Image: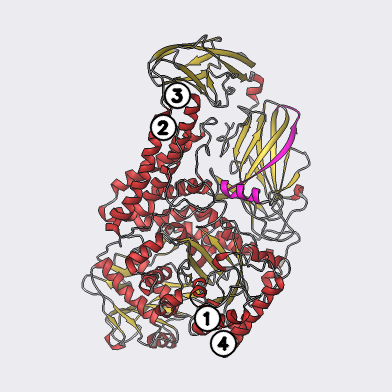
Amino acid sequence: MLTTPSIPLHSARNISTIHRTVQWLVAWLLLIACSSAFALGEPNYVSTKYKKGHVIIVGEKEVASLYVDDQDYKGVQRAVGNLQLDIERVSGKKPALTNNPEELGRYAIIIGAIGKSQLIDQLIENGKINPSNIEGQWDAYHIQTVYKPFPGVIRALVIAGSDKRGATYGTYDVSEKIGVSPWYWWADVPVKQKNRIYIKKNTRVQDAPKVKYRGIFLNDEAPALTGWTIENYGNYNHQFYEKVFELLLRLKANFLWPAMWNNAFADDDPQNMILADEYGIVMSTSHHEPMMRADKEWNRYGKGPWEYSKNPENLYKFWVDGAKRNKPYESIYTLGMRGQQDEPMSEGENVGLLEKIVRDQREILTTVFDDRPVTEVPQVWALYKEVQGFYERGMRVPDDVILLWCDDNWGNIRRLPTPEERKRSGGAGVYYHFDYVGGPRSYRWINTVPIAKIWEQMNLAYHYDANKIWIVNVGDLKPMEYPIEFFLRMAWNPEAWPKERIEEFGKLWAKREFGAEHAQEIADLMTGYTRHNGRRKPELQEAFIYSQLHYDEADRITAEVKDLTARAEALYEKMPASHKDAFFQLVLDPVKASATITEMYDMVAKNHLYASQGRANTNDYAERARILFRRDAALEKQFHTELSDGKWNHFMSQPRIGYTHWNNPPANTLPVLHQYEAHGAADMGIAVEGMKEAWPTPASYQLPGFSPYGKPQRTIEVFNKGTQPFNFSATVSEPWIILSNTSGQVKLNQPIQVSIDWARAPKGKASGTIHIVGTGFGGATIKVNITNPDAKARATLRGFVEADGYVSIEAENYSAKTDSHGFAWEKIPQHGRTLSSMAPFPVTDFSFENPKKAPYLEYEVYFFSTGEFTVESIFAPSLPMFPHRGLRYAIGFGNETPQVIDIVKDMSQAAWEESVRTDSRKILSKHKIATPGLHKLRIYMVDPAVALQKIVINTGGLMPSYLGPEQSARF
């Protein structure tokens, strides 16, 4: 039996959150019990095998007729027309579409909005369907099979909508269930062919969204989307937007900020606004475009400066015209004002001026919408960048205005509603980003956002009641298909997607698009490449991001992404011809393109390092970098000219290589490469793992230390600085030092793997040397240090064991955890740079001011050394979402008093930039360990909304790297 945990000092909000968590768990258990019946988390009521009581859509001899009232909303009629086409796409048979009830066949699909459809209203009146739970709701739909709904009709599938979008969503729900992906056009996903289509007996589905406005922002759209749009449509006209509207509705979205860099939605084509409203898309203008007027409209029609302090009359009239123009259509009016082209106001942070602007805008709306209270006119104030500062200093707007909180442009929400702000009638929403132009570096080329990160942030938004608007900047739309769908699916019903189902989403998505056989492998590829891009975006890649010297990091990461590419290419070959285009654009290209950038910079780094060491093969790595640079260009060309017969030309044209500051270069630019002119003699050089210098450059050459519980092998490379081969020999001072080879001929380079025979090695600390002779005077001597615990220490080993001067732990691999007062640390799968994260749940307002009463994670750690150690706790780069409170945790070993640490104590620009570049915040704490042996490290909850990913304890030998060392050995 599930019980509601008790929470100290809780509010009603905390209680409701606990109940919601319990509901999530119950729903999830039900889903697991019948997971085979779900497609992207929703009931599958379609069958290809007939059973008594099923509704025949396409049978052996019969095809159901489609009915929609000719007085119904145009958007509903259009959706029904698309369902007719979808059934034909799937089955090859086109159902009849009628507006006449007398023309219904023996089997029918009856679709309509309540109050707009004669037959739907009649079915309700006759008690054949009971959609009372959705009547009057926003965007809701009711799907039901009905026996003998009307004379002459044996069975019908009835889709009733609470409004025009509800009926449309129900219609497209059927389209998806019969085998038409929402991405059938935008990503060329083939429809699933079926000779027979039946709706299961007793089907009854009712659904409505949890977030009111759910949409996307087409932004930063040149050169890619704009180039494609101009080539195909001439401009951002209604022919283009009809494709966008249909996609949004198939994804159960309803909201759009249109492309605006060089365009004005309502002015470019008057049909844009008319058709948006007909389809059921609620339009608005972006966070810096007030009153339904596009930024570019001021350039076209505005008079005087864009400054309200100097030019209020002209701006006022400009906004009046926007309100009048959009009065007939569903719109959300953006209030406030920023500078043109998304810059801060030239008047500075003048609170009084902005308050007057909002008052005047409300006055305009009151005058224009004289048929209703102004409180019924949807309005939003976007608290973007410096505008949030106006709010924090006391500026307020009327309670009916939606407060649109924003992320930091890098997927970390800056602020969410406090308990008091949650009482506002207008509510709140979130503006999120998958794409951004700005510092520390623009990222616009490819998908870099793992869905687990989206979940972690938007789950917080939902629990803190930011549920009126969820809108995400998707850049060019392609290639953001995967995160767009996750974001919008989650927006429809966050409660259907608890953290336990993050991994399932990828598999369900892959199954729908490409079939069940390879769904898990495709999901793994999507997780792999997005995790990789999430921890360092391609635009931020450069030489030496991943360490060439320590923990084999650069080689490991390159091997990882090359493995992803090989697996994706192998699957591509297995795909039927009909699926290859979709697989290429959704899976193979982003995997391979991302890997190509990373491998190229690895080659650049090796070229630079080897040039500094004087290696004869330096230029080989320059050529490898050039080959990979050309591979990137070839992938772009393939996307533009070969994929789908050139349908998607321009979409990969965003420059991504060669950044030197925040903005992209005008074209991809090959990184600087070094040329080494090897002389004509034989000349030995020796590179030692962990060292930048190479013999014969003077240095103290030694390998990183050895431990039975650390890295088993270290590498020495004997290389040639010239063009003539030479022979070398290597000897050891101690019999327990093992070399993979002790002599050989070197043309370019020869690696020597060094390991330890622990059975022969002395106990405790010991050292020895390796001596290598070749062409140089005297040869090179390399020191080897070992730590070999005695039998007594070995017998007591437990937990994560110190080796090589550190202990590294993935956060999910705790030894024990203790829950407290209904709170617990729980895993967010896939959320993290290397594995996952642990975060406190449920999400409430409660903080533990006394960490000793808080839930904690416990990690058993075994130390051989003592002293003052530094613990590096690696967290997600979240921001403090509430005023006057940070993001705190507590940490301590054993019974020591926990140190309470604020993850976001340093809110400097430099600290923030580093956190988004690395997608993490690394927090240091110091601890004294007086005795060797087993110790227990505890991480305590203090505040909600923290996400711990990894722990690295530096016992004196931790070396610099990007991701930190791999997890330590565990006993």
Q: Residues within 10 Å of mark 3 (few under 14, many from 20)?
A: many
> Which callout, 2 or 1, points at the residue further toward the start of the chain?
1
Q: Is residue 401 above or below residue 746?
A: below
Q: Is residue 236 above or below residue 622?
A: below
Q: Secondary structure at mark 2?
A: helix
Q: In x, y percent, where is residue 446?
A: 44, 53
- For mark 1, what is the residue? 322
Q: Residues within 10 Å of mark 2 (few under 14, many from 20)?
A: many
Q: Secondary structure at mark 1?
A: helix
How far apart are the alpha carbons under marks 1 and 3?
Answer: 67 Å
Tell me which amino acid carries mark 1: Gly
Q: In x, y percent, where is residue 151?
A: 31, 87
Which circle marks residue 368 in the picture? 4
How far apart are the alpha carbons under marks 2 and 3?
Answer: 11 Å
Tell me which amino acid carries mark 2: Tyr
Relative to 73, 551 lies left or right: right
- For mark 2, what is the residue? 621
Tell me which amino acid carries mark 3: Arg
Magenta-span inclusion, residue 483: no
Q: Secondary structure at mark 3?
A: loop
How far apart are the alpha carbons under marks 2 and 1?
Answer: 58 Å
Viewer-side label of 1, 4: 1
- For mark 3, what is the residue? 615
Q: Nearer the viewer, residue 704 or 241?
A: 241
> Which callout, 1 or 3, points at the residue further toward the start of the chain?
1
| Quarter of the rendering occupied by the N terminus | bottom right
